[in-house]
Amino acid sequence: MFRRIDDAVRPAGITIWFEGQSLHAQAGDSLAAALLIHDAGAFRTTPVSGAPRAPYCLMGVCFDCLVEVDGVPNRQACMIEVRDGMQVRRQHGPAGVADDG
Amino acid sequence: MGGTAHDAIVVGGGLVGSAIALGLADAGLSVTLLDEGDVALRASRGNFGLVWVQGKGLPLDGYAPWTRRSSDLWPDFADRLTGETGREIDYQRQGGFHLCLNEEELQARALLIKRLHNQAGPDGYDCRVLDRDDLRQSLPGIGDAVVGGTFCPYDGCVNPLALLQALHAAGQKCGVTYLPGRRVDRIEGSGTCFAVRSGAEIHRADRLVLAAGLANRPLGAWIGLDVPVSPERGQVLVTERAQPWLDLPTTYVRQMKEGSVLLGDSHEDVGFDTGTTVAVTGDIATRALRTFPALAHLRVVRTWGALRVMTPDGCPVYDESDAHPGAYAVSCHSGVTLAAAHANVLAPAIADGSFRNIFAGFTGRRFDVSAH
Ligand SMILES: Cc1cc2nc3c(=O)[nH]c(=O)nc-3n(C[C@H](O)[C@H](O)[C@H](O)COP(=O)(O)OP(=O)(O)OC[C@H]3O[C@@H](n4cnc5c(N)ncnc54)[C@H](O)[C@@H]3O)c2cc1C
Ligand code: FES
């Protein structure tokens, strides 16, 4: 559905992991853009109704792009730059509050 | 004469005005609710949503029983609002805590509760002082910084924005005409008829209730009432939504049904400034973290400031004008807590004329300096 506007510009390729699968990305990509190019589908489900959501505003205000990044829940994929080896998972509903402090 | 005629006009569509408008409509009056709009100062849209009993009462004798009465009316009131409007308001009444982080705080709190017990006399004031081990049984997540606290079984909470919507919706179902974008700028009373102006628009009624929050002070002057309210800022932080983790509310940390955690309870005198500051939000966050260390895992997504409608003694001020009988001003800090009593007790007393007898103790004249 999405493709890069300028295929000629190719900064170094990097690998990120989405739900355990490796995906190709380019340095400087926002995580949301990198996932959208690979048709990642729903990024998260909402805490209240469980409805699926994907990035909407791509500028940090709608929170519909939330994913878990390197074990940290509820991160805004549109506000994060990809990093080689990044482990990304869908955000299912609300984050947990761990008891250990 | 001109202008639209009603049985009653309520000025201010916050929690106080909406609850009173609903109660007046229940009593069979045709009611128009005039509300300013988004530029107004509106505590009803920035509060913590506690339906709170513990700690309230002093120094005004009638305030503790009035709060308790509203708390007792709340379960049926909540059912009614949701039943009539289909709006869930997430009301619960399973008790609540006030937590203390050092011995002085705990001792001051225990003393306050003791004085409230004494004030209540044989009716009792059902609030218990607990040490850390007692607290851990119901609140396993508290940190070692918590030395103790108090628990009251009547405390509860609600989603305050949903409550405001439900009050408006229920009022309109019962015939209240809600008119937003009407900033009242002039009130004229002749005999028992009031002409209330908003720009070029005039509304008339023989009963008038001012429930405009902090604007009750300037508006009260039109009907000869000195309404001693002033702003007190509270800042609130809200986290991302999290899994259910805190069942019972505390005075400064609570979890909403949808999962966000609210942190709050600052008190500042900064005039009409609704901003937020790093210093105060930092203090709020630090206190919340010492109380519940696991909160460190959550991110704060929004902060805001809102102005409490504060009276000199923190207790409600209810008055009917002597110069203009039929004109009332209703101001209070705990408008969430008192919503049920405002709709079910105060509004009927305005409708049937018994207000003065029932609410004499709440008059603003209690602040007049007596000359001996
Ligand atoms: C941070 C904070 C936390 C709080 N927490 C709690 C809590 O946990 N529990 C609790 O019980 N209470 C709480 N409160 C208090 C509670 O929010 C207020 O008591 C309540 O909202 C007051 O409602 P109100 O309708 O009197 O005033 P407001 O909400 O201020 O509403 C006034 C209304 O009048 C309208 N208005 C103003 N001027 C005019 C005019 N000239 N013409 C027409 N309309 C006008 C405005 O548009 C507004 O809608 C809290 C308050 C704050 C600030
Ligand atoms: S897409 Fe809206 S916040 Fe990320």
Image: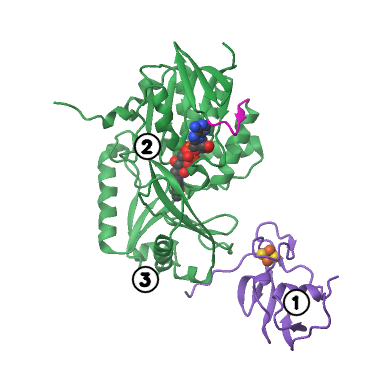
Chain colours: A purple, B green
Magenta residues, start to end: B175-183
Residue B77, quarter of the rendered image: top right
Q: Amino acid at mark 2?
A: Val
Residue B35 place in picture, x, y as percent: 55, 33
In the image shown, does B311 or B137 lie closer to the viewer? Answer: B311
- Disc 2 residue: CB within 8 Å of ligand 1: no
Of callouts 2 and 3, which one flags the residue occurring earlier in the amino acid sequence? Answer: 3
Give the residue displayed 43% in from the left and 64% down from the top: B285
Q: Residues within 10 Å of mark 3 (few under 14, many from 20)?
A: few
The secondary structure type at the circle numbered 3 is loop
Residue at position x 42%, y 23% in the image: B222
Identify the subunit bearing mark 1: A
Q: Which mark is residue B144?
A: 3
Most distant residue in the left direction: B372
Q: Is residue B63 magenta?
A: no
* Residue at the farthest bottom position: A12
Q: Nearer the viewer, residue A58 or A6?
A: A6
Report the residue marked by disc 1.
Answer: A34
Label number found at residue B201? none
Question: Which of labels 2 and 3 is toward the front?
Answer: 2
| Type of amino acid under label 1 | Ala
User: Residue B229 bears which disc, if any?
Assistant: 2
Q: Position of residue B178 (x, y in %)?
A: 61, 30
B138 is higher (above) or lower (below) than B216: below
The answer for how far apart the CA atoms under marks 3 and 1 are is 44 Å
**Amino acid type, callout 3:** Asp
